[in-house]
Image (cartoon, rainbow, N blue to C red):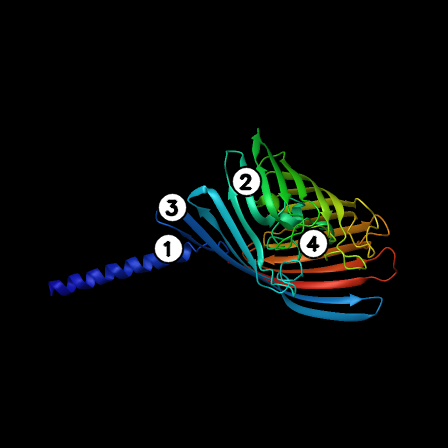
């Protein structure tokens, strides 16, 4: 009898503990979107795994042809690994793109028929001193802010027209990145020497190398989130005004692609690669305060020799982008964007274009789980007819 009472009491105690544990787990749900992480028992190795996807619908109306088109696609599907090896001062990042848009092909990647270009990032980062780190491998260059912001952390369905025409994108080479704090101000210089033709190129280097210099300045100190200057929208609802200003200069010596790292490879009528050096200048800013955010960029890209190819396709000209949004307490956000790009000569591969965009987003778990939509009016200064585009996208990251 006494044994049975003890047994029942023990079982009741275990049941109460189990309920308590389950209740505690229910109240302390894991943070969604932070991936799966493993660290070795001896703390000499760690890796984190993330996956994300963007499922997109696009409906476009062309006024010149009075026609409507629609499209459904997986815009992005990506896998990312990052962590450290031996010491936390030696980090790495690998990111793979699985969608067709990520794996677009070209004949300069070592396969004459075009090889799948899955690798987005493959970079080792060595923090060799308190203020400086050396990066080696393939990753984003320290260019315009909108490009450095992850495609998963955008305020609109996708980046602006300015970025698609003038960005530096990813490249393979070396980068030197620094960070200094002076009072409350933060200065972050960065320098890069890269191949100049973009990611996943295995052909012998064309022309010379690409040289990039960037300076980041935060006059009011760091954002609440350490990545806040490179995340769109003010999800942290900054209690104090925060501002980040960036300047970038890039010189791509002997470029053979339309935009340097992006665009098609330019050839003359005989099929010979045409080299033309590109000079790119960016100014940008990010401002956040109590749910209100502003992102603005100016771009100018010049070529050494205008009209140096028969197609006139090197992308030279200027661009300006201004976008602002307000994040409501309900995690709905309204945002507006104005973008304009214009070519500088008749030989430029840029077409004059203006875009006016209204965006509406619902964040279910910040940028990790969201539904975004935007409506864009597209106009061409040289033409009377334009276009209207509606996009809706669901994004999930874990």
Of the residues under marks 1 and 4, which one precedes in the sequence? 1
- In the rendered image, which residue does mark 3 sit on? 43
Q: Give the Cα separation between the discs numbered 3 and 2.
A: 22 Å
The residue sitting at the left extreme is 1
Marks 3, 2: nearer the viewer: 2
Side of 88 where 226 appears, left or right: right
Tag 3: Cα neighbours inside 10 Å, few (<14), some, or many (≥20)?
Answer: few
Q: Give the Cα separation between the discs numbered 2 and 4.
A: 24 Å
Of the residues under marks 2 and 1, which one precedes in the sequence? 1
Q: Give the Cα separation between the discs numbered 1 and 4.
A: 51 Å
- In the rendered image, which residue does mark 1 sit on? 24
Q: Nearer the viewer, residue 326 or 323?
A: 323
Marks 3, 4: nearer the viewer: 4
User: Contact (CB < 8 A) between labels 3 and 2?
Assistant: no
Q: Give the Cα separation between the discs numbered 3 and 4.
A: 40 Å
Task: Give the percent coordinates (x, y) of residue 32.
Answer: 49, 56
> What residue sits 44% from the left and 46% below the top?
85
Q: Give the Cα separation between the discs numbered 1 and 3.
A: 28 Å
Of the residues under marks 2 and 4, which one precedes in the sequence? 2
Task: Give the percent coordinates (x, y) of residue 385.
Answer: 86, 62
Under tag 2, what secondary structure?
A: strand
Residue 175 occupies quadrant: top right
User: Contact (CB < 8 A) between labels 2 and 4?
Assistant: no
Marks 1, 3: nearer the viewer: 3
Task: Give the percent coordinates (x, y) of residue 309.
Answer: 81, 53
- In the rendered image, which residue does mark 2 sit on? 134
Tag 2: Cα neighbours inside 10 Å, few (<14), some, or many (≥20)?
Answer: some
Of the residues under marks 3 and 4, which one precedes in the sequence? 3
Q: Measured along the vertical axis of the image, is residue 378 above or below residue 277?
A: below
Tag 4: Cα neighbours inside 10 Å, few (<14), some, or many (≥20)?
Answer: many
Q: Give the Cα separation between the discs numbered 2 and 1.
A: 43 Å
* Disc marking residue 262: 4
């Amino acid at each position: 009898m006494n044994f049975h009472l003890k047994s029942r009491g023990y079982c009741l105690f275990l049941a109460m503990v189990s309920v308590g544990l389950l209740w505690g787990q229910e109240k302390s749900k894991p943070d969604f979107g932070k991936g799966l992480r493993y660290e070795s028992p001896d703390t000499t190795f760690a890796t984190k795994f993330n996956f994300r996807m963007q499922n997109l619908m696009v409906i476009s109306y062309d006024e010149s042809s009075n026609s409507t088109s629609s499209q459904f696609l997986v815009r992005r599907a990506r896998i990312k690994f990052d962590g450290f090896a031996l010491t936390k001062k030696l980090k790495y990042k690998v990111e793979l793109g699985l969608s067709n848009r990520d794996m677009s092909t070209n004949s300069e990647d070592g396969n004459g028929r075009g090889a799948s270009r899955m690798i987005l990032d493959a970079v080792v980062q060595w923090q060799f001193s308190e203020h400086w780190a050396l990066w080696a491998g393939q990753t984003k260059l320290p260019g315009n802010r909108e490009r450095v912001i992850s495609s998963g952390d955008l305020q609109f369905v996708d980046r602006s027209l300015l970025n698609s025409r003038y960005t530096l994108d990813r490249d393979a080479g070396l980068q030197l990145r620094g960070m200094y704090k002076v009072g409350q101000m933060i200065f972050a210089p960065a320098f890069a020497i890269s191949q100049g033709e973009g990611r996943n190129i295995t052909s012998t280097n064309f022309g010379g190398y690409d040289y990039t210099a960037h300076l980041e300045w935060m006059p009011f100190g760091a954002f609440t989130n350490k990545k806040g200057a490179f995340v769109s929208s003010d999800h942290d609802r900054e209690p104090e005004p925060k501002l980040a200003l960036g300047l970038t200069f890039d010189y791509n010596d002997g470029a053979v692609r339309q935009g340097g790292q992006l665009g098609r490879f330019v050839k003359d009528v005989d099929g010979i690669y045409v080299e033309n050096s590109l000079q790119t200048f960016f100014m940008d800013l990010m401002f956040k305060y109590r749910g209100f955010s502003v992102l603005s960029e100016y771009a100018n890209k010049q070529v050494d020799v205008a009209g140096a190819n028969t197609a006139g396709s090197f992308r030279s000209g200027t661009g300006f982008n201004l976008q602002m949004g307000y994040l409501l307490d309900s995690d709905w956000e309204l945002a507006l964007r104005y973008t304009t790009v214009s070519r500088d000569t008749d030989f430029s591969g840029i077409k004059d274009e203006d875009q006016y965009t209204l965006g509406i987003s619902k964040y279910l778990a910040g940028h990790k789980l969201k539904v975004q939509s935007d409506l864009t009016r597209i106009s061409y200064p040289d033409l009377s007819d334009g276009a209207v585009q509606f996009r809706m996208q669901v994004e999930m990251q874990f």
